[in-house]
Amino acid sequence: MVGKGAWVLNFAFASFFPNSFFHMNLRCTREPLLAALQTAAVVVPTRSTRPVLTNVKLDVEGSTAVLSATDLEIGIRTEIEGVETTAAGSVLLPSARLMAIIRESPSGTTFEIESDGNATVVKAARSQFRLPAEDPIEFPSVATFPTEACFELSSPLVRELVRRTVFATDNESSRYALGGVLLELTDDTVVAVGTDGRRLAKMEGPSSIQGGELPATQPIVPARAMQLIERSLGDAETPVKLAVQSSDVLIHTGHTTISARLVEGRFPRWRDVFPDRPDAIHIKVVAGPLLSAVRQAAIVTSEQSKGVDFGFESGQLVLAGQSAESGQSRVEMPLDYSGDTVEIKLDPRFVSEFLRVLDPATSLDIEITDGQSACVCRTEDGYGYCVMPLAAD
């Protein structure tokens, strides 16, 4: 028997939302809908000269529902898991308002989304919202992943490629290529490189080609797109597929496809940064203790005097920083080194950002020759980092 309160509530809804024939219908629980919306909404601009871009597009066909969004530079398509549909169709939904509706609802809520082309109704057991419907034809097309041959990478490798290179890029540079990550892809290897002109990070690992043959390629992928790729990986060890077209790159993993315009410009000849230096000294250190020492030494530095002196002495590394307004620092760190003293001044931010992307127990090799040449760091898993020295005082 239906309670009187429920009858009154349903009557109120029926009066406010009159019955009509709906052309599109979807039923889904809160969690997968929210996850898909959070993924798609990342690229939705808060303001745009094209207001239609502040929406997400919902496409329902058969037993499949896909949310898509774009800012015209990057596009995302993500499939909603566990949906039930009785009528196919497409509808535009205001991203921010729909996010608020879903997020403010209790966990486990089941939603039904219906649209007749004039309005869209989002309803749950005890709530109902009528949203204006824009013409989905006005929404820009978001690319689907191609069916032909593609490169394939493991998700753990992609996660490290992003984390270990994006931080070294420079989105504010007039040299557009520095705002992206260079991907050198062959049939068995991928090398990712990021640089801002003062430091350079490169990570490499295995790749493969699925579905045919492909020539080697070297796209420059926007740093923001690389970060979205990492975010879309989730916890699953799903393979990451990558396809390069004339001016775009498409990445597919799990239920999500990301498309992005490639960065234009000429990327620096990064291999020249890692020269063969037989006269260089090699010093083994552990990332965690070195990061702690660098952060301590940098406490007294300032924007005007931001360098930290690294003195590699027999048995220890001495780090020293100073500024007129904050004083001086001296930090000693035990070191397995017995050669001549070598000193180099480095930006502690550049060193710290590199060390933070490593596991604290990671062993790395530091290669230096003098105070005027680049400091090169390498790990055993294919990661290399090069930072230019600052001028000595």
Image (cartoon, grey):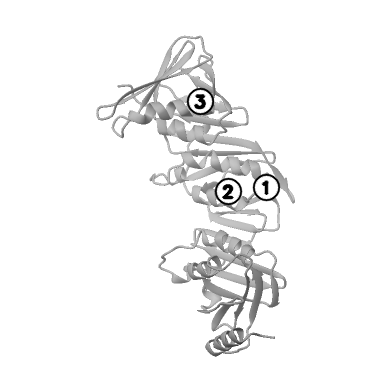
- Does the rendering let one see residue 388? no
Q: Residue furthest right?
A: 211
Q: Is residue 317 above or below residue 89?
A: above
Question: Mark 2, mark 3: which one is toward the viewer?
Answer: 3
Quarter of the rendering occupied by the C terminus? top left
Query: Alpha-carbon distance for marks 1 and 3?
Result: 38 Å
Residue drawn at x 57%, y 43% as measured from the top left: 218
Nearer mark to the viewer, of 1 and 3? 3
Label for residue 151?
1
Q: Disc 2 marks which amino acid?
A: Glu
Tag 2 secondary structure: helix
Q: Residues within 10 Å of mark 2 (few under 14, many from 20)?
A: some
Please name the residue shown 53% across and 28% down the image: 287
> In the rendered view, does 98 fall on the left or right side of 306?
right
* Closer-to-camera residue (268/103): 103
Say which label, 1 or 2, has the lower sequence index. 1
Q: Amino acid under label 1?
A: Phe
Q: CA distance from mark 1 to mark 2?
A: 17 Å
Q: Earlier in the sequence, mark 2 or mark 3?
A: 2
Q: Is residue 384 visible?
A: yes
Q: Which residue is mark 2?
A: 230
* Whole-percent x, y for residue 165 in the image: 52, 39
- Quote the CA–CA distance across marks 2 and 3: 27 Å
Q: Which disc is residue 289 wearing?
A: 3
**Between marks 1 and 2 in the image, the one whose residue lies nearer the viewer:** 2
Which of these two is toward me, 245 or 126?
126
Mark 1 or 3 closer to N-term? 1
Q: Secondary structure at mark 1?
A: strand
Q: Position of residue 335 (x, y in %)?
A: 51, 16
What amino acid does circle 3 point to? Pro
